[in-house]
Image (cartoon, rainbow, N blue to C red):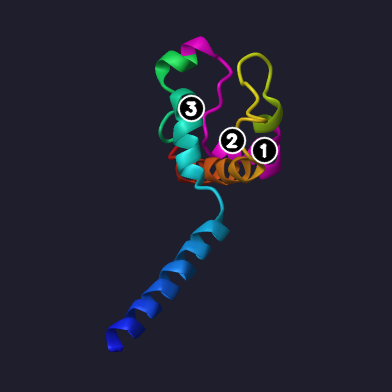
Amino acid sequence: MRIRTMMIALAFTSAATAGRAFAQGADGKAVYDENCKKCHGVIGNPPKTMKEKYSKIATFDAKFIEQRTDDSVKKILNKGKGEDMKSFKGKLTDDEIEAVSKYVHELAAKHKP
């Protein structure tokens, strides 16, 4: 009987943990790594090859934060920006776009001048 009680408690704990993970939403780092890292780099500093190919590519640093809000980053992700930055509307969910926007601002806050 004691083992059964422990198993039931474990099942409830697992369900509660899974529910909390789902409620947290998309993982901004994982979505960034899959969709943004190639062009913008691991830490928000684009690789040399991308800087040469796209002269206006964003570096996620303090200057970036000063000039862009979460909403403006979400807008760029949804609409794109010129020919260099494609739109991710339809490819990423609203939740994923929100998560990436927050993650980009986190990268920028950590970026050293």
* Residue type beneath disc 2: Phe
Tell me the crowding category of disc 3: few under 14, some 14 to 19, or many 20 or more residues within 10 angstroms, Cα based: many
Q: Which residue occupies the extreme top position in the image? A: 53
Q: Quadrant of the N terminus?
A: bottom left
* Residue type beneath disc 1: Lys
Q: Disc 2 marks which residue?
A: 64
Q: Label 3's element?
A: helix
Instruction: Tell whether 69 sits left or right of 35.
Output: right
Q: Label 2's element?
A: helix
Q: Is the C-beta separation of discs 1 and 3 under 8 Å?
A: no
Q: Disc 3 marks which residue?
A: 40
- Residue toward you, 28 or 14: 14
Which x, y percent locates residue 53? 50, 10
Q: Is residue 61 magenta?
A: yes
- Residue toward you, 39 or 46: 39
Q: Is residue 63 magenta?
A: yes
Q: Disc 1 marks which residue?
A: 74
